[in-house]
Image (cartoon, coloured by chain):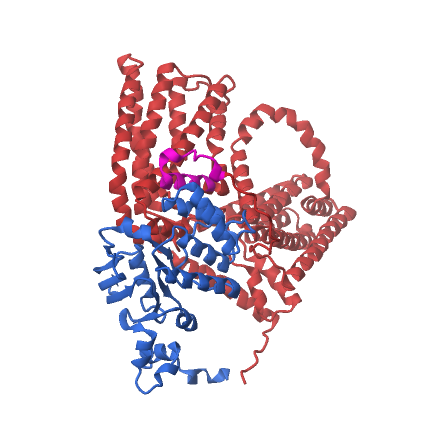
């Protein structure tokens, strides 16, 4: 048993000449609700893909629950759940069929898969359309079924790439409560989102990545305390994010150029 | 305050839409990263041009011939040909997937009249319309050369016929767009199209057998065709040629009436679209239903011997097959092929050749051809998985299990189809000798196991995403197709001399022994290839995810 759920050492990924993720050293403690932030194209999804087996790192290593991913991929995958970018659904299955498929792929027996599938469909408010194919789901419904599939086997680490995008407020509220309960029970949640209010409300710890490099990591209090000249306790995550990522001003669009619109 | 846009005039709007279509065409060409695609399109363009010009010459000559030889009534045949092509060609191409959606133009500030005219003008750019206009022009030229006095009538009737076709084509297109907006109907339409293509194969045998009996029935139907626009157009031209003004006017009035009726319907359709008709595929909110309590938990798992992961993949593959109208309906092809080839080249009623091949050669040859059809999807076996490929990679399974599940389904389908085809072959043509029957069984196992090994490798190296119920833009991976053909040639190259061994040596059971050995070797080879292929899948995962998640 280890206290750290996720540890990366010099994790790097190159695509030709582009360094998408550049020597990231990350530590996420077990049971943390961890927010992973960054502007578009910063390397968030690439990092998640490397931590979940969808992408091989060019160099560096990732250790999950004390197991080196590269040498124990099956054992690591057994203990993690993922909502990948694009959701990775088999769209010609119904929601129930997809959950059954995923449950069986994680080695659950059929009765257990069946029971959990029904409970998850009820929880996600997807149970009233048993014959609807995922292809015919709305975007929010697809997100919910992807979330259900990610947790059906009871993972110890949950990776969520923009989990609340397109999900209605009612379901999002229930999901947040569920995720909160999971972290109380020791599940580690690794979340990316562009909605900083959500991250601020849910996450205890945050890391910020920009241009492939990790530029900040710590608890929200630690990040607040790190901003000079601000009243630490009143600083929002958005202000922290902007002050760290937008320091050189290159990220801010020039409104003067759109004067004809105003 | 932002500037308020000035609404452009009607002609400016038409020019903009024409420019949009041109730009879309050019950009589609630019997107093709494979030079063979461009070569294919150029060849298609040349073929299309030859078709239009060739038919135009034939139409012109036909019109000249009919008018000058006093067979004016026959000119209706030319109008019928143009009419059928103009109306049917766009219907078939519409089923191959969504192209540019004309309705998206509704976001711009058009009034209904402009929307209607642009919609009509939009149809002129279709291949069928361009071909139809060219042929009408050719008809006018041919008939005018034969009889100069016909020119005014031809000008009027061809103009009316052109606008009638244009309007009807847009009307049918608009209805099709409404129907094909839903995935399910699109798939049913596509399935009907496949059935139509398949049934074309049967025309020759059916005509051979029932052609004479059908002639009186066809003669009875012909008079009823005279009320349709092509016959009316022909009547107008024939009437003018014989200086029967009543016939000429009646024909013109009839086509004009059709034009007005179709225009009214098209106006109503466009008006509905203009008002914002909902064609969305998203399911309407459904009332909560009481879900039946599943009894799966009470049953024992029929596939428990396979292990949960292989069983899960197998079930998923079967579900995908039943929901993929294209793949599902292709399963009738082997039976149709047996019927077509069986009646053409074998049995007591063969129609094509005097000396049919001996059954002991025809039977294994037929089965080999069917394997070629049935095995081709295996060479790009992740094609329909789409983004779901990511689920395989985030699950704690080896690709050994995934291949096993997929290959089991492929093999079972193949064997089932071949068994059905064998039964049909024996019924239509006759039974081969016992040694050839058993040798063919062994050869089938050799071919399936051997090809699956190569097909799995091909699926990992040359993946290409395919969408359900679509054909346009649904080209197979070129390299996968090449590998498929190469391995089929290899299998045929090995199998053919073995089949002839019995003739050369006089021992009818020798091919059975050789094929049995080869089948066992192929099964062992297949089993031992799974682990190396699983390792290869891990290496190729980025390529696979990128190719299939587009």
Q: Is residue B50 visible?
A: no
A151 lies left or right of B460 = right
Residue A48 in picture, x, y percent from top left: 32, 61
Most foreground residue, B516 or A12: A12
Most foreground residue, B23 or B399: B399
Q: Quadrant of residue A249?
A: bottom left
Most foreground residue, A123 or B267: A123
Q: At 47% from the left edge and 57% from the top edge, which residue is drawn?
A: A144
Residue A103 in picture, x, y percent from top left: 40, 47
Residue B115 in picture, x, y percent from top left: 62, 65
Look at the image and tell me in which quarter the C terminus of chain B lies.
bottom left
Residue A125 in picture, x, y percent from top left: 53, 56
Q: At 40% from the left edge and 73% from the top edge, which residue is drawn?
A: A200
Q: At 30% from the left edge and 15% from the top edge, which residue is drawn?
A: B509
- Chain in red (letter): B
Q: Quadrant of residue A198?
A: bottom left
Q: Is residue B239 above or below residue B205?
A: below
Q: Which residues are magenta?
A: B296-319
Magenta segment, principal secondary structure?
Answer: helix
Q: Is residue A123 above or below residue B338?
A: below
Q: Is residue B78 above or below residue B347?
A: below
- Chain in blue (letter): A
B19 lies left or right of B388 = right
């Amino acid at each position: 048993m280890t206290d750290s759920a996720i540890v990366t050492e010099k994790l790097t990924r190159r695509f030709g000449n582009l360094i998408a993720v550049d020597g990231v050293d990350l530590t996420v403690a077990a049971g943390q609700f961890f927010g992973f932030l960054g502007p578009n194209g910063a390397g968030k999804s690439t990092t998640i893909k490397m931590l979940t087996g969808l992408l091989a790192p060019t160099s560096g290593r990732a250790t999950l629950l004390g197991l080196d991913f590269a040498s124990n991929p099956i054992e690591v995958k057994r203990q993690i759940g993922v909502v990948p970018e694009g959701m990775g659904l088999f769209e010609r299955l119904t929601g129930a069929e997809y959950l059954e498929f995923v449950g069986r792929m994680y080695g659950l027996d059929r009765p257990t898969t069946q029971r959990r599938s029904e409970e998850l469909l009820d929880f996600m408010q997807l149970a009233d359309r048993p014959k609807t194919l995922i292809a015919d789901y709305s975007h929010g419904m697809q997100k919910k079924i992807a979330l259900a599939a990610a947790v059906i086997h009871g993972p110890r680490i949950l990776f969520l790439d923009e989990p609340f995008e397109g999900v209605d407020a009612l379901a999002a509220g229930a999901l947040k409560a569920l995720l909160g309960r999971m972290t109380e029970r020791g599940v580690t949640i690794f979340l990316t989102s562009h909605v900083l209010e959500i991250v601020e409300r849910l996450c205890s710890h945050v890391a910020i990545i920009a241009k492939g490099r990790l530029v900040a990591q710590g608890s929200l209090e630690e990040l607040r305390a790190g901003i000079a000249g601000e009243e630490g306790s009143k600083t929002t995550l958005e202000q922290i994010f902007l002050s760290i990522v937008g320091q050189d001003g290159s990220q801010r669009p020039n409104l003067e150029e759109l004067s004809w619109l105003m | 305050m932002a500037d308020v846009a000035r609404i452009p005039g009607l002609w400016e709007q038409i020019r903009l839409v024409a420019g949009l279509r041109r730009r879309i065409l050019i950009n589609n060409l630019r997107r093709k990263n494979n030079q063979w695609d461009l070569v294919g399109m150029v060849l298609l363009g040349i073929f299309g041009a030859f078709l239009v010009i060739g038919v135009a010459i034939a139409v012109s000559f036909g019109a000249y011939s009919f008018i000058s030889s006093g067979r004016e009534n026959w000119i209706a045949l030319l109008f019928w040909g143009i009419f059928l092509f103009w109306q049917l060609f766009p219907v078939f191409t519409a089923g191959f997937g969504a192209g540019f959606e004309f309705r998206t133009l509704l976001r711009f500030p058009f009034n209904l009249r402009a929307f209607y005219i642009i919609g009509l003008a939009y149809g002129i750019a279709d291949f069928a319309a361009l071909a139809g206009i060219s042929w009408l022009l050719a008809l006018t030229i041919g008939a005018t050369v034969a009889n100069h006095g016909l020119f005014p009538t031809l000008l009027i009737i061809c103009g009316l016929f052109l606008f009638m076709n244009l309007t009807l084509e847009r009307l049918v297109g608009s209805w099709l767009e409404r129907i094909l907006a839903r995935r399910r109907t699109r798939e049913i339409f596509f399935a009907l199209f496949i059935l139509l293509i398949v049934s074309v194969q049967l025309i020759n045998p059916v005509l051979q057998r029932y052609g004479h009996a059908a002639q009186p029935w066809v003669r009875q139907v012909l008079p009823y065709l005279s009320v349709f626009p092509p016959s009316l157009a022909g009547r107008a031209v024939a009437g003018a040629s014989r200086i029967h003004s009543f016939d000429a006017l009646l024909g013109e009035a009839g086509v004009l009436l059709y034009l007005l009726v179709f225009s009214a319907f098209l106006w109503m359709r466009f008006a509905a679209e203009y008002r914002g008709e909902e064609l969305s595929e998203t399911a309407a909110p459904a009332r909560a239903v009481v879900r039946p309590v599943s009894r799966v938990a009470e049953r024992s798992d029929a596939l428990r011997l396979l292990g949960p992961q292989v069983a899960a993949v197998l079930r998923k593959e079967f579900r995908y097959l039943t929901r993929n109208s294209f793949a599902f309906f292709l399963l009738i092809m082997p039976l149709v092929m047996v019927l077509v080839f069986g009646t053409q080249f074998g049995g007591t009623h063969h129609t094509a050749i005097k000396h049919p091949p001996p059954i002991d050669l025809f039977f294994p040859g037929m089965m080999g051809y069917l394997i070629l059809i049935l095995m081709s999807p295996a060479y790009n076996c992740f094609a329909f998985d789409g983004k779901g490929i990511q689920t395989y990679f985030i699950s704690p399974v080896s690709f050994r299990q995934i291949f096993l599940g997929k290959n089991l389904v492929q093999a079972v389908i193949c064997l089932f189809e071949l068994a059905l085809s064998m039964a049909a072959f024996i019924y239509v043509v006759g039974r081969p000798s016992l040694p050839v029957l058993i040798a063919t069984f062994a050869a089938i196992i050799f071919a399936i196991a051997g090809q699956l090994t190569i097909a799995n490798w091909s699926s990992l190296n040359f993946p290409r995403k395919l969408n359900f119920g679509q054909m346009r833009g649904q080209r197979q991976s070129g390299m996968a197709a090449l590998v498929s053909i190469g391995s089929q040639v290899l299998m045929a190259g090995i199998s053919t001399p073995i089949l002839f061994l019995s003739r050369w040596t006089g021992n009818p059971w020798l091919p059975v022994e050789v094929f049995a050995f080869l089948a066992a070797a192929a099964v062992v080879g297949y089993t031992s290839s799974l682990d190396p292929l699983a390792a290869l899948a891990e290496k190729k995962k980025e390529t696979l995810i990128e190719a299939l998640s587009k």
